[in-house]
């Protein structure tokens, strides 16, 4: 028997199954690259969209401070990365001489499609 070369039609349920399988597979492939920070703990990952701010360091018994400075680095498709996101750059941006606390913020779209990582310094 000869098979027809005509394209097969897919039901909406089959299309949804293929789409979800593809998204899960893409998420699993990108998870190693997506969790690229070097902190002691990581924020929960979001494969489609992620926006988290977490504390990295705070001096015991101290107030946060009156000034805030932020320094960011960005990555595009995991191929190009630009920016300076160090504590020194964040402190300079906020004219901070005495850093009392540091936060870490990450914004991510589609795994490694676009990633923005910021260091936020607080102090006086």
Image (cartoon, rainbow, N blue to C red):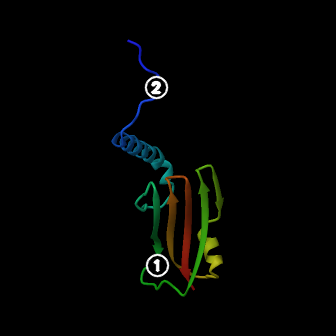
Q: Nearer the viewer, residue 16 or 81?
A: 16
| Numbered mark located on residue 44 in the image | none
Circles 1 and 2: CB distance less than 8 Å? no
The residue at which mark 1 appears reads as 59
Where is residue 12 shown, x and y percent of the image? 36, 43
Secondary structure of the residue carrying tag 2 is loop
Name the image quarter holding the N terminus.
top left
- Report the side of 45 relative to 116 (left or right): left
Residue situated in front as seen by the camera: 102 or 17 = 17
Badge 1 local density, few (<14 within 10 Å), some, or many (20+)? few
Residue extending farthest to the top is 1
Q: Quadrant of the C terminus?
A: bottom right
Q: Residue at x 55, y 69 (%)?
A: 119
Please tell me whether mark 1 sits on a helix, a strand or a loop.
loop
Give coordinates of residue 9: x percent, y percent.
40, 34
Q: Nearer the viewer, mark 1 or mark 2?
A: 2
Mark 2 nearby-residue class (10 Å; few <14, some 14–19, many ≥20): few
Which residue bears the numbered disc 2?
A: 6
Looking at the picture, does residue 23 appear above or below residue 103? above
Q: Say which label, 1 or 2, has the lower sequence index.
A: 2
Q: Residue at position x 39%, y 36% from top? A: 10
Above or below residue 75? Residue 21 is: above
- At 55% across and 53% down in the image, what residue appears? 113
- Tell me what residue is drawn at x 33 percent, y 42 percent: 13
């Amino acid at each position: 028997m000869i098979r027809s070369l005509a394209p097969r039609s897919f039901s909406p349920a089959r299309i949804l199954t293929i789409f979800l399988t593809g998204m899960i597979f893409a998420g699993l492939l990108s998870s190693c690259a997506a969790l690229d920070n070097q902190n002691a703990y990581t924020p929960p990952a979001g494969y489609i969209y992620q926006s988290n701010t977490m504390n990295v360091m705070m001096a015991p018994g101290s107030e946060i401070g009156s000034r805030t400075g932020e320094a960011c680095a960005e990555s595009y498709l995991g191929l190009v990365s630009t920016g300076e996101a160090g504590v020194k750059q964040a402190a300079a941006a906020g004219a901070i001489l005495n850093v009392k606390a540091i936060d870490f913020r990450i914004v991510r779209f589609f795994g490694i499609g676009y990633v923005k990582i910021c260091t936020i310094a607080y102090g006086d």
